Image: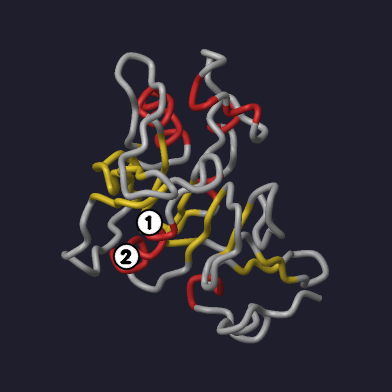
Amino acid sequence: MKRPRPGRQSRYTALNAELRANLTRSEKGGFITILKEQFSIIYADPPWRYANKGGQGVAENHYSTMSCDEICALPVAELAAKDSALFLWATFPQLPEALRVISAWGFGFKTVAFVWLKQNRKAKTWFYGMGFWTRSNAEVCLLATRGHPKRRDKGIHQFIISPVETHSKKPDEARNRIVRLMGDLPRVELFARQSPPGWDVWGNEVANTVTL
């Protein structure tokens, strides 16, 4: 049996009210089945596949990518609480696909949560990629909602200025701002590359704590 992570009570000894609502008893044998935990915050950085093989620094040279149809087919809606927010990273060429994913996952687009303005690693100068028409710099994290989630902090800024790190890794500051914006709620990161404290994670580079 997996031990609970530090700072979190065991799911078997301290089920919260929302999870209790998701307990169902089988009519045969009286077994209890625990359904998937539902999260108020879903944070995702999908491995977008580009039709242009030069897209986003040739992403497939760095990690396995997925088509938009494959991303849409993930049962993310099953993880989302009745009142929840989705934070979805997208590049500008993939905005139509990102909006498709938002709809497929059961959310409605609201706004751009964050704009990441990239700096070079070793100097505080602006980083520039090749782009398709103009030299690219920024990436956006879209905000979509389901139901009526509440904003907890009105002072969260949209711009994130930080250096690029490993290919496609997003700034940790985004994760911190999400928690400040939404509160310390049940949250999961999809396509995660690390296992930050307080977050459940799913992806092919981490030990998954949820199942899709």
| Mark linked to residue 190 | none
The kind of residue tagged 2 is: Met
The kind of residue tagged 1 is: Ala
Left or right: where 43 falls relative to 211: left
Q: Earlier in the sequence, mark 1 or mark 2?
A: 1
The quadrant in which residue 61 appears is top right
Residue at 58% x, 79% y: name it.
Answer: 15
Residue 120 at x, y percent in the picture: 40, 44
| Mark linked to residue 182 | 2
Query: Badge 2 local density, few (<14 within 10 Å), some, or many (20+)?
Result: some
**Is label 2 in a helix, a strand or a loop?**
helix
Q: Nearer the viewer, mark 1 or mark 2?
A: 1
Left or right: where 103 falls relative to 199: left
User: Quick one: 205 or 144, which is closer to the camera?
Assistant: 205
Residue at 45% x, 33% y: name it.
Answer: 101
**Is label 1 in a helix, a strand or a loop?**
helix
The answer to whether residue 20 is above or below residue 48 is below
Most extreme residue toward the left is 154
The answer to whether residue 64 is above or below residue 80 is above
Q: Which residue is disc 1 drawn over? A: 174
Left or right: where 99 falls relative to 210: left
Left or right: where 180 falls relative to 155: right
Residue 95 at x, y percent in the picture: 36, 27
Query: Badge 1 local density, few (<14 within 10 Å), some, or many (20+)?
Result: many
Residue 118 at x, y percent in the picture: 35, 43
User: Quick one: 171 or 154, which is closer to the camera?
Assistant: 171
Residue at 35% x, 52% y: name it.
Answer: 162
Q: How is the image coloured?
A: secondary structure
Give the distance between the C-alpha atoms of the residues marked 1 and 2, in whole angstroms.
12 Å
Residue 197 at x, y percent in the picture: 54, 72
